[in-house]
Image (cartoon, helix red, strand yellow):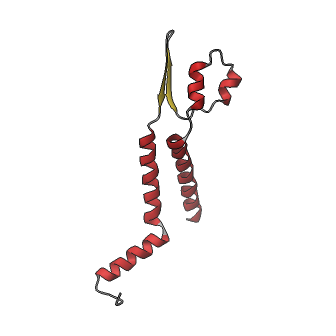
Amino acid sequence: MEAIENANRAKKLRLKKGYEKLAFGKTNDAVLLLFQDGLTPEELKKLDLTCLSGIRRTKDTVELCFYDRLKALDCLRALESDEEEKSPLYRALMESAAKTEGGEHDGV
């Protein structure tokens, strides 16, 4: 069971890092791609184009499609709220609130 939980934590961490890169990452290399003609395959491999969801090139234009940063932020928020709900502190607070609602007041 612990191995599954560790795998799930690792997966969430990879997702979080990916969403953070989409939400806060730089677009410098994508812009460089617009202005640099004749990049070699080696130079292209060095560019960080994670922020791009697509590239369309015609003989006259280049169109870059970027991932939606706001959607990435929403996904980050959702991941963090899932983590908060499952944290031991959250569970303890919810149990305490349930006891209080049930009439077991401690005088506080």
Q: Quadrant of the C terminus?
A: bottom left
Query: How many discs appear?
Result: 0
Q: Residue at x 56, y 48 (%)?
A: 17
Q: Is residue 6 above or below residue 62?
A: below
- Say left or right for 96 vs 103: right
Residue 55 on image: x %, y %: 51, 23
Q: Quick check: 52 above or below 58?
A: below
Query: In the image shown, does 7 or 74 lie closer to the viewer?
Result: 74
| Residue 70 on image: x %, y % | 42, 42
Q: Nearer the viewer, residue 32 or 96?
A: 32
Q: Residue at x 58, y 54 (%)?
A: 10
The answer to whether 64 appears left or right of 95 in the picture is right
Q: Quadrant of residue 107?
A: bottom left
Q: Looking at the picture, does residue 106 appear above or below residue 86?
A: below
Q: Residue 91 location in percent, x, y? A: 43, 72
Looking at the image, residue 42 sits to the left or right of residue 99; the answer is right
Q: Quadrant of residue 100?
A: bottom left
Name the outermost residue toward the right.
Answer: 42
Q: Height in image: 11 above or below 58?
A: below
Quadrant in which residue 6 is drawn: bottom right
Looking at the image, which residue sits at the far bottom?
107
Residue at left offset 44%, top offset 76%? 92
Instruction: Tell me residue 74's x, y (percent).
Output: 41, 48
Residue depicted at 69% across the width and 24% down the height? 43
Q: Quadrant of the N terminus?
A: bottom right
